[in-house]
Amino acid sequence: MRTPVQSRGRGRKAQVVSFPPPTSGWISNQNLIANTSNKPGAVVLDNWWPTPQTVRIRQGCALYCQPDDTQDCTSLMTYDSGGIVKLFAAIGGTIWDISSPSAPVAAVTGLIGGEWSYVQFATDGGVFLVACNGVDPVQLFDGTHWWPLTGYAIELVQLGTVTKAFTDGETVTGGTSGATGKVLFQQGQQLYVQLTSTATFKSDETITGTEGGSAVASEDGSTYWPGITPADGSSISTLHPSTFTYVWAYMARLYFVQAGTLNVWYLSAGAVSGTATPFPMGGIFTGGGSLLFGSSWSLDNSSSNGLSEQCVMVTDEGEVAVYQGYDPNLSSSWSKVGLYRVDKPRGKRAFIRNGGDLLIATDAGLIPLTQAVERNPSNLAPGAVSYPVQDAWMQYVSERPTRNWQVEVWPEMQMVLVSIPEAENYQAYLLVVNMNTSAWARFTGWDALCMAVSSGQLYFGTTSGRVAAAWQTGYDMGAPFTAIYAPLFHDLGGTFGAKMPKDASVMMRGSTDVSWSISMMYDYVLTIPSAPAGPAIDSASVWDAGIWDQSMWNSSTNMTAQKKWSAVAGMGYAISPCFQITSGNLLPFDNEIVRVDVTYLTGGLLS
């Protein structure tokens, strides 16, 4: 608890108040004058990371790669199976393989683009990444190639005599069968074709292409990947896989959300393509709207003596339907657990699985689904993980009508991140919370349009096709950033007397000597001065200072204490010292706040 302490001296007695490190994080919803709490919080905590002991200045982000600078990076997707680790970036109409940042490869081209949803799914035939965005064909990655899944099959045609090799994307026609399709690629005597008709290629017929390709089929074409077609045998126009906006896995089965509807489609167990069965939800959701996303969820079920996996479907109106079972076709193995309501989600990627629970970013806050089960919909905010920053959260919601937020968990850092994209006249933020302490902070300068974690490293896509690696270097892709800390205001135990701060002392610890500035804020008004200049650090001591993944060479990392006094000025009833450090070097800071002390004199009433 912060306790004013008198110091002995002649004449007027100066007193000292100590502010401990804000291990409770950023708090924006506390009663302004409730400053005698033992909770060490902050009214401003920008670019600090709260830990159980202290707060540490965050590290910056480094440019990982930039395959295309003409459009924004809107999606990142990861694949990890059997030693094959891939990172993909969706930029405009191209999916880039950026696993090697120095040599990105355009893996899929000619797409419309958008916000992709994806899931890694294991079957008897392998481990696959399945992705959809609502406008392009469903994309399937098998560890080597990407395959488009439409309402028609992908056919493998064995070729005999090849007059001229086919070109990727070339339209081809069978001379006898009349089959048509688009060439995906040719590999020797094997031709992979995305069919555009129900007819299939036949043996001994001549296949010709619009770009001059020509060859004779040596045998009938065989289905390499079936398309995604309606299970009831109705017209293929009934189902357009390109309208699938979200995909998730539950009980060894893939489920898809169809854009602008309350329909879910699901495949056979263990399948990544083939026939899809509709599961209409219009009669379930009374609030209307359309489906937004789905997920698996672990619910404590006392009847089964432990956690029971559920299937969750969420609408853009904030209704949540929960089902249990393994086959929607069988009433004996599929039943509705309940229908609940959270506030409107902030986007189809604005949720994460956290342990067995779901955390959904809604207009009311970051809501655990378990709270929606137990609370009245109008009383969800107090149960939100984001409740300490509720006022700020509501402000960001009111400023940003577009529902394109994203939530990501970074397990290696025990960090949950909520991306709040830039809006008209409002800058982008990342709200972060320590999963162990529930302490919040705000990161500025990271305009994360999408996020993903691969091999323990957090990446985020941003404007102009850039992909950044987080927690690298001491600046943000070459730009300095300022860490700001201001503790909750303190009236020093005397609400009606004016206080006149004289000096402020900051004690820090770290392996680098840093400079900082400190000023005073008064009477619950945030008046943050201009950021101080960052100190110059010799980058010659940095080993392998490339585009990212910097490490120190022959440099000491011993922690030392650093403390200095600074004169401050002003007068008010309640005070908060505003502490700022600017980081703008290749070498990241590791400095932590130990305490802030302020000496002050007490005065009379202010008029």
Image: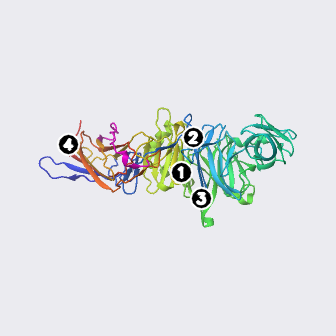
Color scheme of the displayed model: rainbow
Q: Earlier in the sequence, mark 2 or mark 4?
A: 2
Residue designated by label 1: 453
Residue designated by label 4: 603
Which numbered disc, 3 or 1, marks the residue closer to the eye? 1
Residue 302 located within the stretch drawn in magenta: no
Q: Name which residue type carries label 4.
A: Gly
SS for callout 4: loop
Q: Earlier in the sequence, mark 3 or mark 4?
A: 3
SS for callout 3: strand
Residue designated by label 3: 298
Q: Name which residue type carries label 2.
A: Thr
- Kindly check if marks 3 and 1 are in contact, taking CB atoms under 8 A apart as contact: no
Q: Name which residue type carries label 1.
A: Val
Q: Earlier in the sequence, mark 3 or mark 1?
A: 3
Quarter of the figure with the N terminus: bottom left
Q: Is residue 403 visible?
A: no
Is disc 2 surrounded by few (<14), some (14 to 19) or many (20+) residues within 10 Å? many
Quarter of the figure with the C terminus: top left
Residue designated by label 2: 74
